[in-house]
Every structure is written in C-alpha cells, then in structure tokens.
Amino acid sequence: MTDPRPRGRFAPSPTGPLHLGSLVAAVGSWLFARRAGAEWIVRMEDLDGPRVVPGAADEILRALERYGLTWDGEVAVQSRRTVFYEEALAQLRAAGHAYDCGCTRAEVARAAGAPDAADPVDAAGAVYAGTCRAGLPAGRAPRAVRFRVPEGIVAFGDRVHGRIEEDVARAVGDFVVKRADGPFAYQLAVVVDDAAQGVTEVVRGGDLLSSTARQIALQRALGLATPSYAHLPLVLGADGKKLGKRDGALPIETLDERRVAESLALALRLLGQEVAGEAPGEMLAAAARSFGVTRVPTGPLRVAADGGIVSGA
Ligand code: GLU
C-alpha cells in the first residue's frame, strides 16, 4: 500500500557546494512541502561518477542544517540503489520500451544533421534519428540503452508555469536511459526514485522543466504515478549566463550567521516571497506561513551587483 501522506523532495547532485540556484531549489521545495504539511526528503543524485566531488554530499547536508532546512527520514543515495534501476530497465526491455544502441555521440549528431557533429555543444542537442531502433546494425556492439519514445504530445500542468506540452519524439527522440560509460541516466533514476520514495510533488529548478515530459513518458511506460510538478525560476549569474560552479557558491566554511540569513533572504526574494524574522528558522517558519504559489516568478532571474533582482535573461 502506498503512503497517502504528501511528500516533497530535494535531490541535489553532489558536484560541489550548495550554490544560489540549488539553495533556491532547496528552499522552494521545502516551502511547498511544509506549507502543505507534507514530508520533505533529501536524495543525493551521485550517479554521474566523474562529476561527483568527494565530500560535497556531506557539505550540502551540513549547509541544509545551517539554513534550518530540516528533512524527514534517511537521506537516500542513488549510487546504492542501482538494483532498482536494473529492475526498471529490465521491465522496459521486456515490454519493448528500451533497446540497445551502438551509436557514438558523433554518429548521433551526424545522423541528426547537427552542424558540427564533432562539437560537443552541437552533438549534445541532437535529436536521435532512430538508427538502432529496429535492432543493432550488423557488426555494431551495444553501447547505450535508449527508451523508445511513444508518438504523441505529453501535456502536464506545472504549478508555476501552467500548462506545458511537448512532443518528446520530435523534440528529443529516443533518449538514453543507461549510458555508454555505464551509469544509469538521470531521467530513469529520478523517475524510479520519486515513485519508490512516494514523492507526490516535485519542486525543482527551472532548468529541469524541459526534462519533465521525458520523465512522464517513462512513468507511463513503467506504470508509475505522475507526481505534481512545480519549476522554480532559474537563477542566472549577473552576466545573464548559467551559474557556473563558482558563481554564487555557498561553501559551508564561509557561512557565518549573517551570510546564512542574507542568502536565505535572497533565496526567498527570488521565490517572490516575503522576508520576515532574523534567524534562519524564524525566516523559514514565517515564509511557510505566508507562502503564495502565485507569487513565485517563472524566471529566469538575475541578481544585479546591488543585490536587486532583475527579471529576464
Ligand atoms: N540532481 C538534479 C540537480 O541537481 C536535480 C534533479 C531533480 O530535482 O529532479 O540538478
């Protein structure tokens, strides 16, 4: 039997200390959950081995504690859960929803007509042409495993952005669920874990809005429930570019009381919420009481040099 209690989550990748963008995701998901009397759990998404920074997971957890972002239960760690991803993959394969792909990244890009197949930027956005859909071409060895995306539009209601529609087959094509270098892909792991952990509301950074239709397609293929979704405003650097590793990093050793309160106040303002109280715990409790979903901006947002918030890229 599934637990009927609503549950939100924060799922950071331990690739560095908490930064302003991940703090906004943590505070936003905490507020959505606590305001609704829901549980809030934390999951470390550490499947992308080469990007994982030793010690970062602990540092993120200590930072959450300093901010007063208390979580429920044990922290789940994806690298200890691969057996569940294996099971899901076997289920997809058995139903014909997944297949081996022998293409290299450059071949995928070339088949998609990317301007420069050797350029990782062009190659990354390439829609898979379906080369191995009907079986591996003769002489090719399996590399990645792909999800066979069904035809049609996936539509969902985002609590911040409203109705979103995506034709996943056209926009992305059959996407990778197990990578050529071994790890399970984020898209599969996140769907399996959100379902296994009874997550009923997914509240996360706006950069993942474009992943949601893929995740819903996977949920349907696996017979899993779809949680509600809310995507928070993407926070860009002062130059309007995506926050890099160092921008807005909030390393725990530099987090004195004053810095913690300041960054928390900034995160609340980025979420369109009122700031009241002095200590982090007080500020969060006040924000949970006065929280209004309709005030959450769609973004993207930039923090100007004078601390003001500017809307737009
Ligand atoms: N691990 C992802 C990240 O840090 C977030 C995944 C999610 O919230 O679905 O960007």
Image (cartoon, rainbow, N blue to C red):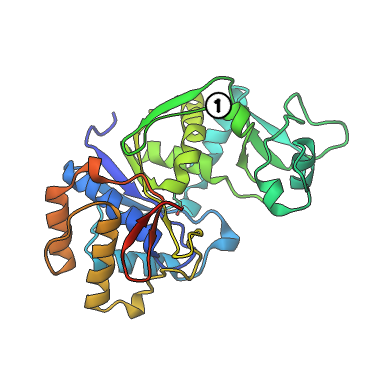
Classify residue 222 as left or right of residue 225: right
252, above or below 121, in the image? below
- Image quadrant assignment for residue 301: bottom left
Secondary structure of the residue carrying tag 1 is: loop
Q: Considering depth in this image, is 303 or 119 the residue closer to the camera?
A: 303
Taking depth in this image into account, of 56 and 78 the one nearest to the observer is: 56
Residue 198 drawn at (x, y percent): 32, 37
Q: Which amino acid is tagged 1?
A: Asp
- Residue 283 against residue 173 in the figure, above or below: below
User: Mark 1 highlights which residue?
Assistant: 167
Q: Residue 188 placed where, x, y %?
A: 52, 39
Residue at screen point 34% across, 80% down: 254
* Residue shown at 24% from the left, 45% from the top: 295
Which quadrant of the figure contains the N terminus? top left
Q: Is 210 left or right of 268, judged from the image as shown?
A: right
Describe residue 202's horizontal placement relative to residue 81 as left or right: left
Residue 230, position as x, y percentages in the image: 34, 40
Residue 50: percent from the left, percent from the top? 60, 62
Residue 277 figure quarter: bottom left
Residue at 41% over, 68% down: 248
In this picture, residue 298 sits left or right of residue 114: left
Residue plotted at (53% across, 63% down): 52
